[in-house]
Image (cartoon, coloured by chain):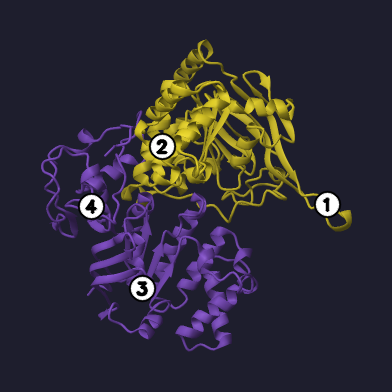
Chain colours: A yellow, B purple
Amino acid sequence: MTDAAISERKETGESGPREDFLVLDSVSQHFDLGTGFFGRGSRGVIKAVDNVSLSIRQGEILGLVGESGCGKTTLSRTIMQIIRPTSGRIFLEGKELSSLSDREVRHERINFQMIFQDPYASLNPRMTVFDALAEAIRTRHPGVRGTALRERVVELLRLVGLSPAQMKKYPHEFSGGQRQRVAIARALAPEPKLIIADEPVSALDVSIQSQILNLLKKLRRDMGLTMIFISHDLSVVRYIADRIAVMYLGRIVELGDAETVVDDPLHIYTRALMSAIPQPDPRIERSRKRVILKGDPPSPLNPPTGCSFWPRSPIPHDERMKVVEPELVEFHPGHFAHDCPFCLQRAA
Amino acid sequence: MALLHVQDLKTYFFMRGGVVRAVDGVSFEVERGQTVGIVGESGSGKSVSCYSILRLIDEPGRIVGGSVMFDGEDLLQATNSRMREIRGGRISMIFQDPMTSLNPFLRISTQMVETLRLHTDLDQRAALHKAIAALEEVGIAEASKRIHSYPHEFSGGMRQRVMIASALLTEPDLLIADEPTTALDVTIQAQVLDLLKQRQERLGTAIILVTHDLGVVAGTCERVNVMYAGRDVESGTADQIFYDPHHAYTQALQKAIPSLQTKGDLLYTVPGMPPDLSKPVQGCAFYPRCPYPKLAPPDGPPPELVVLTEGHCAQDCQYCDRSKPIEDVLTSDVTEAFE
C-alpha cells in the first residue's frame, strides 16, 4: 500500500469512527506456577502474553495470527477480562476495564461476544435456536417479550442467512456451517461492541468456509462491527482482516496493514509463516523456496531470553540479541516489527 | 503395471436407518514411487476408501464390491493372515492424530521393535538398532535416548515424525497417509511434508495422501482424485486438476478458497452442503449445489466418468448448462440455500 493510501485511511479514520476504540497498554498475562515441594524454589512463570500494546479502530477487523501456544487465545480472554491481566491496562471507548471491580466487569461483558471454533461446544444442546437467541437478546434488553422478541429473533436469523422457519430446531439438527451461523447470530444478539472470533472457520469444510467468511465480512460492512479474528491460517486472515498482528511466544512481533504484512513482511517469523502455507497452485508450489523453521516453538515456561525467536531462526543471532529484548518499532507508517537486526534481514 | 489398482470399490454401511453408500464405485491407480492425492470434504468417502484398501472396515460397514489389486494380488480376496502380513509390512498407514495410533502405555522402542520383529527376521538387538537409525533419519535428536520415551513425552510434530519413522520401518511399497498434517501448525506441517518427500525419494515409496487442503495437494501430489459424495468426480495430474478443472465441483472449490493472492471484496461461495448419503442419490450428487444453470431434473443414472485428455477423467454431467465459464455463474451469496 502506498503512503498516500495510508494517510488517506488515517484521515477518514479521524473524521468518523474513533481510533482508540480498544486500547491495550503494555498488557501482560503471566501464570505463576507457584513454589515447589515444601515451598522450595519457584517452579517458574508462564508468560502467555507479554507486554502487548495495541489499539483497535472502531469498525476494524484485526487479525491475530500465530502458532498454537503463542498466546492468541489468552490475549483475547484477557481483553474480555475473563482472566484479569497481571499488569498493563485495557480501555474500551476510553473506559478502563482493567480497573473495574468483578461486578462491574460482569456488567461490561455484554459488550464483548465470542465466536468459537466448535459451535457445537458453545451452543446449549437442550435449547432451541429461538431460546438461545432470546436469552442472549434479554441480556441487553431484559424487558423484551412476545412479538417484539420474536421479530428480533427473525431479524437475527435473516442477518446470518438462516430461514426463520428453523428457529424451533435444536443445534444437533443443523450442519456444521449452519451451526456456526447460529453461533454468530447469538453473538450478535446482545448488540456487542466487540466480537472476538477464535478460529471460527477452522473446523469447517472448505466449501462452507467461504460462506462464513463472506457472512462475517458482510456483517462488518452493514453493521460496522469491530472484530478480533484469531486464526493460524494467514490466507484466511489476509482475506478478512484490515490489519494483522503476528504473535510469537506471547509477544507481537509484527503489526501492520493486512496487505502490507502479507505482501511485504518485515520479520523473518512472518516470512516463515507465509512460506509454510501451501498454496493451491502446483506451479507456485514447485518453484517456491521455503523458510523452514527448526524445531517446535519453545515452551512459554522459561522462554529464551533476548529476541525470543533466536533458537528457531535460520539466521544465527549474536550474543547481544540473545540477551537484549527487542522493541516493537514503527518502520513504515503503521507497520511495526520487533527490532532485531537478524530477524529483519532480507536475505534468508 | 500399476502398483495399486482400485477398481469400482464400493463400501456401504448398513445402519438401522438405512444403507449409507460411503464409497460408491471408486477407481484409481497408483504407480510405484508416485504420490496420489485424494481430496474431498468430510463425508466424501476419502478415508473409507483408504481403510477399504487395507480391509479395515468394521461392522456395520462392509466392502460390497470392486477389487483392490496390489502388485498383482486382489486384497479383497486375500486371507486374513495374508492381510496381517501386508498391513504394516508392504502397505503402511499414518493417521491424522498420531496419539490414537501409538499405544500410550508402551515405549516408542517397544512399539517400533514389535513392528520389525513381526515383519522381518531381525533379532531384538538388530531391530532396536534399525529403529534408532529410523528415528535419526526423521530428525529426532538423541534418538538412542529418546526411543525409550513414551508417546506423550513428544510434541505433536515430533509424534508425527515418530509415526512416519515407524510406518517406513519395513520399507513398504505403499504408504497411506490420512490427513497426516491436519492437526499440526503450518510451520510444523511444512517440516513434516518436507520429511515425507525426502523419505519417499530415498525409499521409492508410493504415497496415497488423503487431505481436504488443496494447497497440500498442489505441493506434493503428481496425481489428484477429487471425491464427492462417495464417488470420483474428477481425476488427473495436479496440473490438469488445478489449471484445467472440468467438473463443476472442482472448479467451484478452487474459486471458493482464499489464497495469499486473493484480492477483492467477497469470496465465491458454494451454496448448500454435501448430500445425505443414506438417501439414494439421483443422477448427479452435486446437482443441488451446482452453480451452472439447470437443464433437466437429475433423475437418470449418475454421470459416467469420461476421458477428457490423456490421464484426465471427469464425470460428464448432462444435467446442467456448462457453456459459460464458472466465474460467470458463481455468486458470493451468504444466505443458506433452502430446500
| Chain of the residue on which disc 1 is drawn | A
Q: Earlier in the sequence, mark 3 or mark 4?
A: 3
Q: Residue at x 29, y 55 (%)?
A: B277
Q: Residues within 10 Å of mark 2 (few under 14, many from 20)?
A: few
Measure the alpha-carbon separation of dots 3 and 4. Answer: 29 Å
Q: Residue under circle 1?
A: A35
Residue bearing the label numbered 4: B240
Residue type highlighted by circle 2? Lys
Q: Amino acid at mark 3?
A: Leu
As drawn, which residue projects farthest toward the top?
A15
Spatial CA distance of label 4 from label 1 is: 61 Å
**Is B179 positioned to the left or the right of B45 in the image?**
right
Q: Residues within 10 Å of mark 4 (few under 14, many from 20)?
A: some
User: What crowding class fits label 1: few (fewer than 14 Cα within 10 Å), some (14-19), or many (20 or more)?
Assistant: few
Separation (CA) of disc 1 from disc 3: 52 Å
On screen, residue B201 above or below A289: below
Q: Position of residue A214 (x, y in %)?
A: 38, 33
What chain letter is assigned to the residue under label 2? A
Q: Is residue A152 above or below residue B150?
A: above
Badge 4 amino acid: Gln
In the depicted structure, whether residue A249 falls above or below residue B104: above
Residue B263 seen: no
> Going 36% across and 33% down the picture, which residue do you hit?
A162
Looking at the picture, does residue B187 appear above or below residue B106? above
Residue position for label 3: B54
x then y, percent, for residue B291: 22, 39
- Cβ–Cβ below 8 Å for labels 3 and 4? no
Taking the image as drawn, is residue B314 in sight?
yes
Check the picture and name the quadrant holding the N terminus of chain B: bottom left
Q: Position of residue B24 (x, y in %)?
A: 24, 62
| Residue placed under numbered mark 2 in the picture | A168
